Image (cartoon, helix red, strand yellow):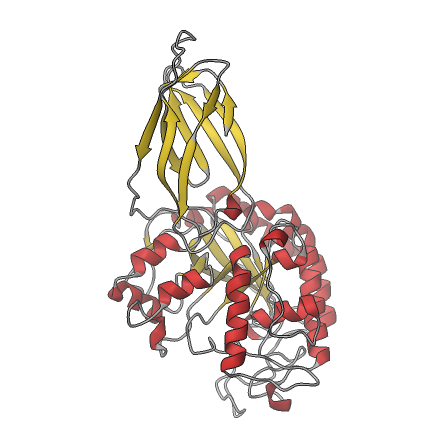
Amino acid sequence: MNINFRTCGLYISIAATTLLFSCKDEGTSLVKVEKINVTYTESTEDFPNPERGFYRYSETNSSDYTVLDAEELKSYRTLQSIPTATYTVYSTLVFRYYILDNVTTTAISESFLSNIKKDMVAARTAGVKLIPRFVYTATAHAGTCPEGFICPPYGDAAKSIVLNHISQLKTILTDNADVIACVQLGFMGTWGENYYSDFFGDASMNGNQNSTLTDQNWRDRIEVLKAMLAAVPTDRMVQVRYPQFKQRYLFGVNSLLSSAPLAELAAFNLTDNARIGYHNDCFLASTTDFGTFDDYGNSSSPRTSDGTVLNALRDYMKADSKFVVVGGETCSDDYNLNDCEPSGKAQQEFADMHFSYLNAHYNTAVNNDWQTGGCMDNIKRNLGYRFVLQSAVIPDNVVKGTYLNITLNIKNAGYASPYNKRTAKLILRNTTSGEIKSFDLAADVRKWYS
């Protein structure tokens, strides 16, 4: 980089995407420019960087709304204990369930929309980002159906209602993009996970046709995702629950499991392909992460779950996730591979699938094992991006009118790169007067890959 300015005596530090230089103005008499080689020791500190890490969970109902409290949200940025957990976390992300429990056949009320706006104000005041998911039910009703612990009717809404609600939410999502990290698709099925659904195909053992989704099921789901992508600002991503859903959205209901993942040349360009990410809400819960890596079939092919399907969808998500937002939660402690290495592969899976965030509250039986197993500190530090300044070559003395040439060697030690656009800045501070000079850099930190 070449920058023309008047300064001398440079020192360097780095925090997130800001490069800070301290300097002292001693006039223009210096003519000789010396270079200094500096090496840095990586910190092991955990700190609350934006849009990454363990998120705090919250929920509210349209029938009984509780507005987010700015002071409580602000406290999440300090080190806090989690109920039933043996670990503590910093959090800059807040997951927010909006449960539309009393509007499954009607429009969203103006009071509910007004309360969402208040949530956004609270997040902005507190300096945190929200991950919203709009759903109609987050409750499992037990019964005599094949799955037993959850039986139909599940309680979600028809497609026409869903599309109308998305239209109502568009203005709020657009106006408050600055406090939204990403949006999870939601709406369809219990918990908004597109699985147990009354209207969009039941992919569970309770469903017909061997739990296979029909072509119409896929078309309906695609229509909802398309509406959500249109409602969310183009500089924010929408997460889906299953990698095959993204394939079917992009390549049609007959798309192959070998469909091409997102390539770097097409990444971060605001197209639908570049804006669809993932939330895996059963991270390392089973071989297939409880259906995350299943082929749900269509009208001409049955649902399939085997090694070939698993490998194809894992390879797709592994490659695709390098360029989109990935997060989620753990959900079962019965699968030993979700432990720390070497007995498990938790850290490797986070890295392979480029995880930026995880639920701090669920499932603490799984997460507590990481504390006991000794890898929790690494996971807390490495979720998302973690930029490490390793070394630098900087000038010691600079004369006004000459070029400043700086070499910075930076490593991203995290599991992922940033998923939202952020400007990297070179900041120069005069140590005598305190004057600040700021220069925007051309580098795209989303491409500072792990």
- Along the viewing direction, whichever of 361 and 432 lies nearer the viewer: 432
Q: On the rendered structure, is 66 left or right of 41?
A: right
Q: On the rendered structure, is 424 left or right of 343?
A: right
Q: Look at the picture and state if 118 lies above or below 309.
A: above
Which percent across, then down, holds residue 301? 66, 85
Q: Look at the picture and state if 134 lies above or below 213.
A: above
- Along the viewing direction, whichever of 268 and 403 lies nearer the viewer: 403
- Name which residue lies at 43% across and 57% down: 55
Which percent across, then down, holds residue 100? 61, 66
Q: Quadrant of residue 162?
A: bottom right
- Along the viewing direction, whichever of 3 and 145 lies nearer the viewer: 3
- Along the viewing direction, whichever of 350 and 95 lies nearer the viewer: 350
- Name which residue lies at 57% across and 84% down: 304
Q: Look at the picture and state if 202 lies above or below 441.
A: below
Q: Quadrant of residue 242?
A: bottom right
Q: Is residue 158 visible?
A: no
- Name which residue lies at 46% across and 72% down: 282
Q: Is residue 395 visible?
A: yes
Q: Furthest-top residue in view?
A: 29
Q: On the rendered structure, is 29 left or right of 179?
A: left
Which percent across, then down, holds residue 124? 52, 44
How many tags in the picture? 0
